[in-house]
Image: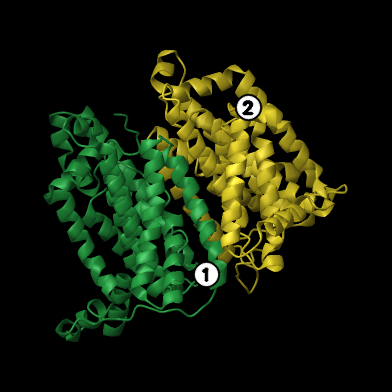
Chain colours: A green, B yellow
Amino acid sequence: MNDTLILIVSGVIAGSCPVLFAALGETLSEKAGVINLSLDGCLLLSALSAFAASYQTSSLMIGFLAAMMTGALVSLFLGIMTLYFRVSQVALGFVLSLFCRDLAYFFGNAYNRLQGVEVGPLPIPFLSDLPVIGPSVFSHNIVVYLSFLLPCALWIYSDKTKAGLSMKSVGENPYAAYARGYNPRLIRLCHVIAGGILTGIGGAAFSLFLKAGWGRPQGCEGTGWIALALVIFGSWNMFRVALGCYIFSFLQIMGLLFQQWFSDVPAQVFQVAPFPLMIFSLVLVYFTNRFSETSVGRNQRKYRLFFLTARFLSKPAPSHLGKTFEP
Amino acid sequence: MSIKTIGRHLGLPVFHVLMILVLSLFIVSFIVLAAGVSPFTAFSLLYQGSLGSVSHLGHVMKSFFPMTLCAMGLVYTYRISLWNIGIEGQVIVGALSAMVLFRLFPEPQVPSLFFSLGIVSAFLGGMGWAMITGFLKSTCGVNEIFAGLGMNFVSQGLALWLIFGPWKRPGIASMSGTDPIADVYCLIESGPLSISGFELILVFILFIFTWILIRKSIVGLKLHASGSNPFASRLLGLQPTLSIHLALAVCGGFAGLAGLFQVSGVYHRLIPSISSNYGYLAILVVLLSGFDIRIVPIISFFFSCLLVGSIQLPMMLQIDSSLSGVVQGIVVMVYLVYMGIARHLNSRIRKPVYE
């Protein structure tokens, strides 16, 4: 029993790591008001560049740096074109997503099924000796530990610092921020790039330990779209997005177990789960908003429990999300 | 159609069209060089693999028909400024619903009647799937991009479940798909190109139909009006919600027919990747066409040539066949960026590109 539990928990934690980085990066960029649809292709391309760089130099550090550079460059391109040249965010993001994927396959051909370096586990001294929790939580590698800290760090950044406030202000109302003396386009650009860097780390996590190596298919196709869905499911809140990632990873692991019970259902079917959940949470957002607008007084008291639950489950998107800003 | 007319249709002078093509060619050559292959060899192989022989041209046409159908459907949705990313799923569901009928009646008494029913079923299937997105958009306020994306993955899951579950081959369930459909449901290929006359005629009729409807009729104008300004069009007595449903229904129906082509014309069974990414590619086609129905077939043909021409690249040059996707992505990106910069320099135009 204990062994199964350890296996599940450690699988969930390791499996959620890349999607967590990607989804939190996307949250950062969407909170600043830019939809970065290139996530899926960006993950693959940075996975490739991480593997290629670490294979050539046999240095993990350079692999991670290369992946971060790739993510930053892709999102820099998207950011400059959409913010300064008013190209549609959706159009360019979508094209970039398909293009980066194909580019990764194209350049990845030379690295097919090669044995590269891998991130080794780094058990935390004392803590990893604890029963159950030790082997399942504290015996991963350093990137996974970083993924524990990331939601907290980003929450502190977005809710407790002045820079985080400026990020939210350009996402909600860039005109007010502009009048206040901020430069909305520059702030947006910085956060899009930061999001790209985090996505790059996510991609590197795929090719350097979770699904180590490169192949076609690599195994992380579709993760970017799932991360996009999880951002909405987590209603742009760092902790909820992180929770969504863990739930998703849990579903994936359980999919493998379910497959033993329902042998005729392929594991891929269980990966679909985040998408109906995403649509459901969007529907919920819409109806709570409409409910709070249309009903006053008695009605609102009458359905108070429903209202509070729905409000608790979902929060509205940044109000200037995906729109262009003209100073 | 000469390059001059293409330029006029793009709303760009010839010079700009040439610039876009030359820039794309330059970037692609650079990427191919970076992979250690001579660009000339790669391009000549792409040409030979697609237009080099009659049989290759037949393959090109086989991917041209479904892609053009999807792209024509997308013209309707872009006309009212809707992003129907869900088209990929609509192709899959169209294929699924055709398969349902083909499997229910494996030995039809009147083949032509049941095949027609299959066409209707595919159309309705794709349409219904698109209408879910439309319903979510109009009634539940869900952005059509996210709704469509979600529905794509749901339909993919549905197809996988059918292939590995209820429709699996006796004994084995594998990624190679279900049992083949009955011969009467497969499209008859004829002529030197060995393409199906049915596909050719259907695509041609729908092309003329779409052209007239979008550009010459009051319906097209209404779609355009409700897309440009939903509020004003409501004041005018138009119904923007109805337009959303109408455009999505037609688009989904076209995508469903593309799914039928894939089942009856190409694979003769249901496979996991039945849509062959034609939905996503059609989005690129329509973006590059500047939403102009008249040049959609040209671009779609160009994309099909790239797709088919790249199949033999791995064998001949040891480079990946995804070069076609790289070229397509580069051309569309150069076009978008070029337009963005051109509009930026011409600062009188304050309208964002495609929004």
Return the residue nearer the eye: A31 or B27. Answer: B27
Q: Which kind of residue does numbered mark 1 sit on?
A: Asp
Asked where in the image residue A43 lies, by quadrant, the reply is bottom left
Which residue in the rendered view is the most extreme toward the right? B192
Q: Is residue A194 visible?
A: yes
Asked where in the image residue B289 lies, by quadrant, the reply is top right
The answer to whether residue B131 is left or right of residue B268 is left
Residue at the disc numbered 1 = A264
Percent x, y of residue B97: 61, 49
Q: Which kind of residue does numbered mark 2 sit on?
A: His
| Image point (48%, 31%), residue name | B342
- Of the numbered discs in the image, which one, if any, rests on residue B9? 2
What is the chain identity of the residue bearing mark 1? A
| Quarter of the image with the N terminus of chain B in it | top right
Percent x, y of residue B297: 68, 37
Asked where in the image residue A170 lies, by quadrant, the reply is top left
What is the chain identity of the residue bearing mark 2? B
